[in-house]
């Protein structure tokens, strides 16, 4: 299958790309490297540095599946950037999916819509739904793994390592999802 992954140099996008390449799929990717790291992307993935907020998609041809992992979340005060990446980027991927008659997988937040990031991710999901293309949404709350640089576990680890206080909320529960490469494929 020919697959496009947005945010291919990020934690989830690069890990998923590795797995899909291993399974024999033809994987292409885009990433603007705002939060992703070029060294996360395998040499088996054909990818370019490109921002999903840009109007023209690099020409890789048609795809059967778009995995939309790209997101802006690095600065909670940068609302315009969140809108450009998370809303305009989703609209762009919805249009491409319609053009190619491709399925879409979208990585979404479970956060309530009280931040620029969460509001824009939810709006992006609604535009993907409006495309009419088959859509699968994954709402991952707390992910962790070797390439993860943000979230609850990396933050907790950095605090402990630096000898800083850590907040532990009693009587709360969270599910954690490991995302990594398994040697037992």
Image: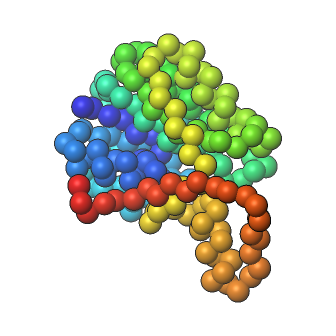
Give the residue displayed 50% in from the left and 22% down from the top.
94
**Which residue occupies the foreground of this view, 10 or 139?**
139
Q: Quadrant of residue 26?
A: top left
Q: In which quarter of the image is residue 3?
A: top left
Which coloring applies here?
Answer: rainbow
In the rendered view, does 78 fall on the left or right side of 59? right
Give the residue displayed 45% in from the left and 17% down from the top.
133
Give the residue displayed 30% in from the left and 56% down from the top.
42
Could you tell me residue 174's position as x and y percent? Answer: 64, 55
Q: Which of the image's four quarters has the C terminus?
A: bottom left
Could you tell me residue 15's position as x and y percent? Answer: 38, 53
**Which residue occupies the foreground of this view, 37 or 103?**
103
Let me know if residue 170 appears in the view: yes
Let me know if residue 85 appears in the view: no
**Which residue occupies the foreground of this view, 34 or 162?**
162
Return the residue found at the far left. Answer: 24
In the rendered view, does 136 fall on the left or right side of 129? left
Name above or below for residue 112 compared with residue 90: below
Give the residue displayed 24% in from the left and 60% down from the top.
184
**Which residue occupies the foreground of this view, 88 or 48?**
88
Name above or below for residue 5 compared with residue 127: below
Q: Which of the image's four quarters has the N terminus?
A: top left
Could you tell me residue 66's position as x and y percent? Answer: 40, 31
Could you tell me residue 140's position as x and y percent? Answer: 56, 45
| Numbered circles on residues, count | 0
Name above or below for residue 157 compared with residue 11: below
Return the residue found at the far bottom. Answer: 163
């Amino acid at each position: 299958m020919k697959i496009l992954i947005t945010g291919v140099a990020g934690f989830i996008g690069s890990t998923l790309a590795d797995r899909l390449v291993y399974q024999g799929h033809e994987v292409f990717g885009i990433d603007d490297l705002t939060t992703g790291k070029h060294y996360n992307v395998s040499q088996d993935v054909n990818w370019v540095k490109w921002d999903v907020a840009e109007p023209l998609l690099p020409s890789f041809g048609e795809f059967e599946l778009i995995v939309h992992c790209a997101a802006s979340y690095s600065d909670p005060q940068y609302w315009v950037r969140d809108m450009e990446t998370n809303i305009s980027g989703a609209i762009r991927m919805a249009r491409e999916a319609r053009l190619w008659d491709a399925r879409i997988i979208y990585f979404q937040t479970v956060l309530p819509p009280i931040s620029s990031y969460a509001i824009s991710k939810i709006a992006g999901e609604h535009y993907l739904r409006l495309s009419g293309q088959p859509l699968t949404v994954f709402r991952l709350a707390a992910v962790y793994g070797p390439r993860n640089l943000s979230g609850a576990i990396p933050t907790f680890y950095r605090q402990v390592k630096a000898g800083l206080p850590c907040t532990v909320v009693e009587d709360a529960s969270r599910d954690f999802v490991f995302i990594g490469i398994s040697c037992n494929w």
